[in-house]
Amino acid sequence: MKKQLTILTTFILLSMTILMAQSKDIRWLMDTTITVMKANAVNRDKVDWESIESNVHSQIVTVQNGYQLGPVCRYLFQSLSDFHGAFYCGDSTFKWKRPGHAISDSIMNEWRKGGRIRKEVLAHRIGYLRVPSIPFDPDRSKLDAKSQSLSDSLCALLKDGVTGVILDLRLDNGGAMYPMMLGLEQLLGQGKIGSFEGSGNQSWIVKDNNFYLDTLLLTTINPNCQIPKKDMPVVVLIGPGTGSSGEFLAMAFKNRKNTLFIGSESAGYVTSTHGFPINDAVSVLLAVGYGRDRTGHVYEKALLPDIINKDPDSFNNIPNDKKVILAANWIELTR
């Protein structure tokens, strides 16, 4: 009996030692994450860190490994109003999903088909160009090719003699922004077209068929046309499917001459993000800054159109799409 009691006591002590070691590791993990957030999160000065840390420490008392940190991480991101960030632990991802705009079946159906550029010459020499999301790829040559494809599509419309362009960003829910921006160089013009505000301010610069983030060259194209009129009328269509880099692209057109926005409120993912490693298995992606347009105006919330129109989208019948009709009418009056 004494031997059994000794074995049981040893087992309990060993279990407590393992639990304490695990608790210490989890405590370190969360304290390090909070330190990173305190230094870099875009909303770091808008929260009560003392209260947050106290709540986190009370929540992790029974947590034994990183895979159980979902509720704690969601609490942290919600406290920071960061629905763009994420906590990565091994093969698990923890995010806070704020209540968002409803995504229509028409948008969801088009997303399921996969993003693709669509161009069309409408009546009265008005061009229609749909810009889908361009996923990030570490292979720069692939992003250059996608930017070139977008530029070629725009040039095809310009060569057909269009005198105004409807730029459809309703399906552009993010990815790599710079191939999109450079692909539309003919419409955006040269120079600084926007920037990131916050931790590490960075300018978006288009110059001589290149896109730079400050002085860092990110992508290059070779346009096969020249726009006949630099201030050609442009209507930008936006909605709840316009998100993240799609919203930054829309920002780049804000305050451009002869430009109008039609549709409904965008998704609101208007923050730039940056990844921070915590250890070999854990990293955190944080919202670290907001987007700014070419005049320096900061967008901390979703983009709003100049003309609100919530009619159903008709992505497979462009000439009869209500937003496209509104856009075409405005272009005819403006050019």
Image: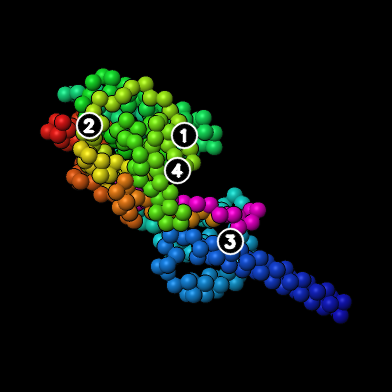
Left or right for 26, reference 330: right
Label 1 – label 4 distance at C-alpha? 10 Å
Secondary structure type for disc 4? strand
Q: Nearer the viewer, residue 295 or 37?
A: 295
Q: Amino acid at mark 4?
A: Leu
User: Mark 4–mark 2 contact, CB under 8 Å?
Assistant: no
Q: Amino acid at mark 3?
A: Gln
Discs 1/3, front: 1
Left or right for 304, reference 249: left
Secondary structure type for disc 2? loop
Numbered range of the magenta stretch? 266-283
Secondary structure type for disc 3? helix
The residue at which mark 2 appears reads as 232
The residue at which mark 1 appears reads as 219
Q: Which numbered tag is attached to residue 245?
A: none
Q: Nearer the viewer, residue 328 or 319?
A: 328
Q: Nearer the viewer, residue 158 or 31?
A: 158
Q: Dot 3: within a 10 Å radius of its alpha carbon, few (fewer than 14), some, or many (20 or more) residues?
A: some
Question: Looking at the image, which residue is at 47% across and 64% down?
Answer: 75
User: Mark 1–mark 4 contact, CB under 8 Å?
Assistant: no
